[in-house]
Image (cartoon, rainbow, N blue to C red):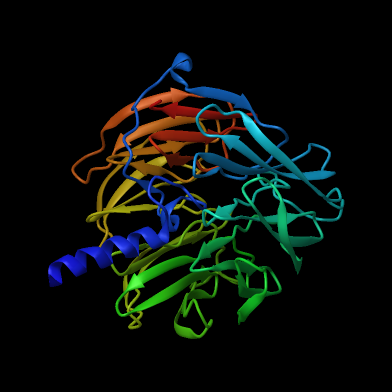
Amino acid sequence: MARRFLLLGLVMALSSLSPAADWTRFRGPNGSGISTDALPSEWKESDYLWKVTIPGVGNSSPIVCQGKIFLQSATADGQQRRLICFDAKTGKVLWNKEVAARPIPKEQKIHPLNSTCSSTPATDGERVYTIFWDGRGLNLIAWDYEGKTLWNKELGSFASEHGAGLSPVVYGGKVYVNLDQDRKAEIIAFDAKTGEEKWRQKRQPLRACYTCPAILEGQGQTQLIVANTSGITSYHPETGKENWHWEWVFTGKKGGLRNVGGPILHEGVVYAISGDGGGDRHMVAVTSDGNKKLLWEAKKGTPYVPSPIAMGNYLFWVTDKEGTAVCVDAKTGKELWSERLGGGGQFFSSPVLAKDKIYAINEKGTVFVFKASGDAFERLGKIDLKETVIATPAIADGKLIIRGEKHLYCVGKQ
C-alpha cells in the first residue's frame, strides 16, 4: 500500500508540471527540453504532415496544448503584435489576435538576432499567457482558448542593449515573470485567473538576462528556481520568500556574464549557463538542497544561448559559435565526448530530446539528429530546412513543430 501511494504521488508530481503529451512553455515540461515521444531521424519535403506560412515575423517559440499550437508574431512594420493559434493536426490558423503596439523607437537598441516578438507563450490548459514589448514597455496578457483577452497587466519599461525576450511560466495557479533588466531586476507572481499581483521580490540587477524560472518539487518543499548574473536563487512559489541564494562570481569579468539559456533541474542539481558575445562562457552545477554546493564548473566549451539537456547520468549541449555537440558526466562535468556538427551556422535554438534522440537546429535551418548516449557520438540524421531558424522547436503528440523565419513545420506521426 505504501508503495502504491508513493507511485501515485510521483505521477501527480510529474503531471502538475505539465500535462502529458503537451509542450506548455518555452522548452516544454519545466524547461527541460525533453519529451518521451518517438520522432523520425530523417525526413524529406514530402514527409511533412503540414507546412504553413506564419503571419508576420518574430523569434517566439511554439507551444502546444490540447491540440492547439500558440506562438507570437509581429507585423514587419512593427505596428502590430499577434498571438496566433494553429490547429496541431492540420496547421490551419484557428485565430489570429492583434495587440496594438507602436514601432520600436529608433533610439532603442536591439540585437540584430533579436526581434520585436521573441517572447514565448505559456499555458496551463485554461488560459494562454503572453508578454508583448513595443520598445517602451512590456504587457503580460492572459487569453482564453478562443482568443479572448481576459486580463492585461502593464509590467513597465524594459532596459537592455539587446531588447526584450523574456517569457512567462505558469504553475500552481500563478504566472511568474523574471523581469531582469540592466538597471532593475525582479521576480513577480500574478494570479493566473485574475492577473492580481500576489508577490514581488527584488533581485540584484547587473546585466539584463532572459532566463525562465523552473519548478523543483521534492526534498520536502516546492522551489521556484531563478538564475541571472547575480546568481541562482530559490523562492517559495506561494509567498516569494527566499529559501537560499548562490552567488555567481565571475573572476576578471567586470559586470559578469549574461544568462540567456537555462536553468535546468536534474536529480537535485541546478545547471546554469552564462556568456557574452565576446566568447566568454561559464557553466555551473549547484545542489538545490539549500547547501548550495558547487559540484563543478566549466569556463570554456559551454553554450551561451542554447540550453543544455540532462538525461540519466549525462548532460548534453551544443555550443553557439562552434556548433559542437558535447556530452559530459552530469555529476562531475567530465567530458565523455564532443563532436563538431558542421553546417556553417551558429546555434541559437535550444536542442530538444525525443525519447533517445537529440534534435539541434542551427541558424541556417540545418537539423542535426544524434543519439542521446554517453558512449560515443552517433549521428542519426541531417535535414536542411533551407530557412533561418532562431526559435526552439516543440514536441507534442508525436509531432515535432519547428518555427522557421517564414514557415511553421510539422513532422511526425499522423
State which quadrant residue 380 falls in: top left
Q: Identify the residue at horizontal 53%, vertical 28% (top origin).
A: 409
- In this view, the residue in front, 34 or 270, is 34
In the rendered view of the protein, which quadrant contains the N terminus?
A: bottom left
- In this view, the residue in front, 52 or 274, is 52
Residue sitting farthest toward the top: 46
In the rendered view of the protein, which quadrant contains the C terminus?
A: top left
Q: Is residue 354 left or right of residue 113?
A: left
Q: Position of residue 404 (x, y in %)?
A: 59, 32
Judge whether residue 209 can be spotted in this image.
yes
Q: Identify the residue at horizontal 41%, vertical 60% (top origin).
A: 17
Q: Identify the residue at horizontal 60%, vertical 25% (top origin).
A: 52
Q: Position of residue 355 (x, y in %)?
A: 29, 41
State which quadrant residue 131 falls in: bottom right
Q: Position of residue 280 (x, y in %)?
A: 51, 58
Judge whether residue 162 can be spotted in this image.
no
| 374 vs 330: above or below | above
Q: Is residue 241 left or right of residue 128?
A: left
- In this view, the residue in front, 276 or 8, is 8
- In this view, the residue in front, 343 or 270, is 270
Q: Is residue 278 left or right of residue 49?
A: right
